[in-house]
């Protein structure tokens, strides 16, 4: 399981020209599920991301979480995070979970995030999503479980 966490000032996600989700600030989380990943891993990822202190406090130190700031998370399913680039120039995705199981784990992860009191908005699993985001910092963290 992998996540790319980006601190953002604003993010919009559209599918076929229709706005699906938008957050005014917080985190955009790209979430990939590997074959065989468990709910325990998703629990770990949700807790870690919800509590990750990557927002500045009054002293300018990264000491506050998305919860502390009352901000939102846009969660985007992204199987390409599991790309194998070790051979040739075309990435392989055999390490990614099958779509039905990956979607189930993605939905579970989003629910777990929301249980920490974070407002979570979602992308559309398997869709061709167009994402506009205004990165803050930039701050980008890669988390693996």
Image: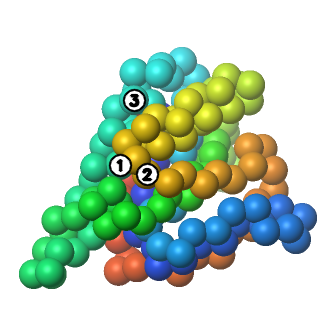
Q: In the image shown, does 51 or 78 lie closer to the viewer?
A: 51
For the C terminus, give its image quadrant: top left
Mark 3, residues whose alpha carbon is within 10 Å: few (<14), some, or many (≥20)?
some
Residue under circle 2?
Answer: 118
Q: In this image, 63 relative to 42: left or right?
A: left
Is residue 114 in sight in this rendering? yes
Residue under circle 3?
Answer: 43
Q: Position of residue 111 (x, y in %)?
A: 53, 36
Is the C-beta separation of discs 3 and 2 under 8 Å?
A: no
Is residue 144 in sight in this rendering? no
User: Which residue is drawn at the image coordinates 47% and 73% (left, top)?
Assistant: 25
Q: In this image, 99 relative to 107: left or right?
A: right
As helix, strand or loop, the secondary structure at mark 2 comes to loop
Q: Nearer the viewer, mark 3 or mark 2?
A: 2
User: Which residue is drawn at the image coordinates 69% and 53% (left, top)?
Assistant: 123
Is the C-beta separation of discs 1 and 2 under 8 Å?
A: yes
The numbered mark, 1 or 2, whose residue comes first in the sequence reads 1
The numbered mark, 1 or 3, whose residue comes first in the sequence reads 3
User: Which residue is drawn at the image coordinates 22% and 75% (left, top)?
Assistant: 56
Mark 2, residues whose alpha carbon is within 10 Å: few (<14), some, or many (≥20)?
many
Question: What's the distance in space between the residues labelled 1 and 3, CA to CA?
Answer: 11 Å
Relative to residue 72, is residue 135 depicted above or below? Answer: below
User: Which residue is drawn at the image coordinates 35% and 60% (left, top)?
Assistant: 66
As helix, strand or loop, the secondary structure at mark 1 comes to helix
Residue under circle 1?
Answer: 50
Q: In this image, 98 relative to 73: left or right?
A: right
Q: Position of residue 10 (x, y in %)?
A: 54, 77
């Amino acid at each position: 399981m992998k996540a790319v966490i980006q601190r953002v000032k604003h993010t919009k996600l559209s599918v076929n020209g229709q706005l699906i989700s938008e957050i005014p600030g917080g985190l955009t989380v790209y979430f990939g599920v590997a074959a065989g990943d468990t709910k325990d891993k998703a629990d770990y990822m949700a807790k870690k991301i919800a509590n990750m202190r990557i927002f500045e406090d009054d002293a300018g130190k990264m000491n506050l979480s998305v919860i502390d700031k009352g901000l939102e998370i846009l969660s985007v399913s992204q199987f390409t995070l599991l790309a194998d680039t070790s051979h040739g120039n075309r990435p392989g995705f055999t390490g990614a979970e099958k779509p039905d199981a990956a979607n189930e784990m993605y939905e579970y992860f989003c629910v777990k995030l929301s249980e920490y009191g974070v407002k979570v908005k979602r992308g559309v699993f398997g869709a061709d999503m167009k994402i506009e985001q205004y990165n803050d910092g930039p701050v980008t963290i890669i988390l693996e479980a």
